[in-house]
Image: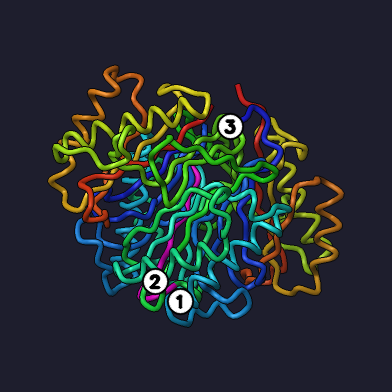
Amino acid sequence: MQEIFANQAHDPIPVAVKLGDLIHGARVTGADPATSELPDTLEAQSANALQNMKAAVEAAGASLDNVGQVSFFFKNFSGAVMRDVINPLWVEMFTDEDSRPTYKFMPAPELPGDQQVHVEFWAVPGQKRNSIQIPNVAHTNPIPFGVKMGRYLFSSRCLPMDPATGKNPEGLDPQLSCSLGNASTLLDMAGMSWGDVTQGRAFLTDMANLPKIESAWKAKTSAPLAPVVYGVGGNAQVYVEFIAAGKAG
Amino acid sequence: MPATLKRLNEVYPSDVKSTVPLGLRINDMLYTTSLNAADPVTGEISGDIREQTAKTLQNLKDMVEKAGGTLDNVARGVGYCTTPDDRTPVDEVWMEMFPNEKDKPAMKVLLGELPAGQLVRLDALVLLGAKRTRIDIPNVSAHDPTIKIGNWVITSRCHGNDQATGQIVEGGLDAEAKQTLTNLSTLIKLAGGSDSNIVQINTYGREADYIPAAKAAFEVHFPDPAKRPALNQQVNFVSSRMQVAMEMFAVL
C-alpha cells in the first residue's frame, strides 16, 4: 500500500492509494493545485479536477495512459451542462479516440461545502489501455463501452440497447436482458467471463425493479451487486456496470 | 496484490440515493475513502467535534460490521480535523471506541482542510478476519501503538526517543530524524521483519524547512535508491517536544 498525496507538504489527505497493481483515486477535487482554493464555477473546478487526476497518477509513478475508468460526481446534476463542460476537457486530455478511459456521470447532492464536482478513478500502472467498443451499441459520449487493462476489465454503464436495432427496447425485462447481454459481449471481447466479475452496480429508476434485476444478476455471477437509484436517460430503466479481474500474470 | 482477487469492489453507502463510495474492499482489506459524520440516511452532517467524531466512528463500525468484521479488525485510523484544539476531542472519542491500551489500532490525528461544515474526517484501514498485536520498543512509551495485523506492520507516528532513556534525543532535527528511523527499524525487527519490508514512510514536521534534513536522514538510512520505501513528507501538527515524527507501513 502506498498513499498518494497531491500536495504533500500542505494537504495531508491522500488523493489516491496504490494497492499492489492498482491505483484508486478517491479524493480528486476541483481545488486549484497551487493554492488548494476551490474556484466558483463548475468549468474551473472540472478543469482542475482532471489536472489533479493527472498529477495523482503521475505521483503514483503511472500516467494518464494507465487510467481505465473515471467517475464524475456532480452536486447539481444536469446532463447537458455536464456534457458541455466535461466532454471538451475530456477529449483534450484523451486525444486518441480509439484509446480513452470510460467514464460515468453521477448526481451527488451530498457533496460537501462548495464542491461542485468530485472525481474518482481506477488506473493500472504499467498496463496499456485497450478500449473496447461493441458493434451497434455505443455511448453518445466520447467513451468506449469498456476498458481492458492487464488483468482488469472496467465496464461503462452497459446500455440496455438491442444490438440488432441500436435502440433501447421498451420495458424492464427486455432492457435487463440487453444490458446483461451487452455485458456478456464485453466480457467475451475482453477474453473474460462472468466468473471474473468482482463487483456490479445496478442503476435503476425504481427500487421496485431491484428483485428482478438481482435475480437476473445472480443467474450470471456471485459477485455483489449494489443498487443505486438514478434517473437514467430516455426510456431506460436499468444499466449495469461492473469490474472484472482475472488472475495475475 | 494477491494473484487471485476474490473480492474487488467499491463499498457504497446504504442509502441507495447516495452515490459516492465510502471505500474499497479488496479481498479481506477495507480501505475507507470518505468517512465522516454524515447521517447514513439523510447525509446530513451536524454537531460539535465530539459529536461528529462519535458519529464518524459509528459509521466506521457499521461499515466494518456490514463487511462481516468487527472493530478488532481495524488496523489504522487517520483522523483529520481543522484546528489544533480539535485534536484532543477526536483522540478522546477514539479512546472511548478503543479503550484497551494493549489492543488498539495505529492512529494519528492531523490537521487538514475539510469542506465547510465538516469538522472531522477519518480514513481507516481494516483487515477483516485478522487481529492486532501491539509492538513496543522497551522503555519507549507510545500513546498510539505500532501494530502487527495479518502480514502488515503499521506504526502510529514515531519519534526520536532514545531507546535507553525513552527521552527524545538531543541534538535537534538531524539527530531526531536519525533516531526515529532507527526506531522504525527496531519496530520492524520486533515484528519479525527487516527494513526491506517497509513500503512507505511518511514524515511530519511543523514547517517545510524540516524536509531536506529528514530526507537526508532517510537517504542515509536507506542507502540503495532502488530499495527505498516510498517517502511522503508532510507539514502538519507535531508536538512542541520534538522536531519530527515519522510513520511506516510495512508488509512482511
Q: Which residue is the site of mark 2?
A: A116
Q: Tag 3: residue type?
A: Asn
Whether B53 is drawn above or below B34: the answer is: below
Range of residues picked out in magenta: A112-123
Q: Which residue is the site of mark 1?
A: A76
| Between marks 3 and 2 in the image, the one whose residue lies nearer the viewer | 3
Towards the viewer: B246 or A74: B246
Tell which subunit mark 2 falls on: A
Whether B197 is drawn above or below B129: the answer is: above
Whole-Å distance between the Cαs marked 3 and 2?
Answer: 40 Å
Give the quadrant of the C terminus of chain A: top right
Q: Position of residue B4 (x, y in %)?
A: 68, 30
Q: Tag 1: residue type?
A: Asn
Tell which subunit mark 1 falls on: A
Towards the viewer: B24 or A174: B24
Q: Answer whether residue A98 is visible to the viewer in this image.
A: no
**Magenta run includes residue B58:** no
Residue A157 badge: none
SS at badge 1 = loop
SS at badge 2 = loop
Q: Within 10 Å of the Cα at label 3, are there few (<14), some (14-19), or many (20+) other Cα atoms? A: few
Q: Tag 2: residue type?
A: Gln
Whether B147 is drawn above or below A191: the answer is: below
Q: Is A38 left or right of B175, judged from the image as shown?
A: right
Q: Which residue is the site of mark 3?
A: B151
Q: Is A17 left or right of B102, judged from the image as shown?
A: left
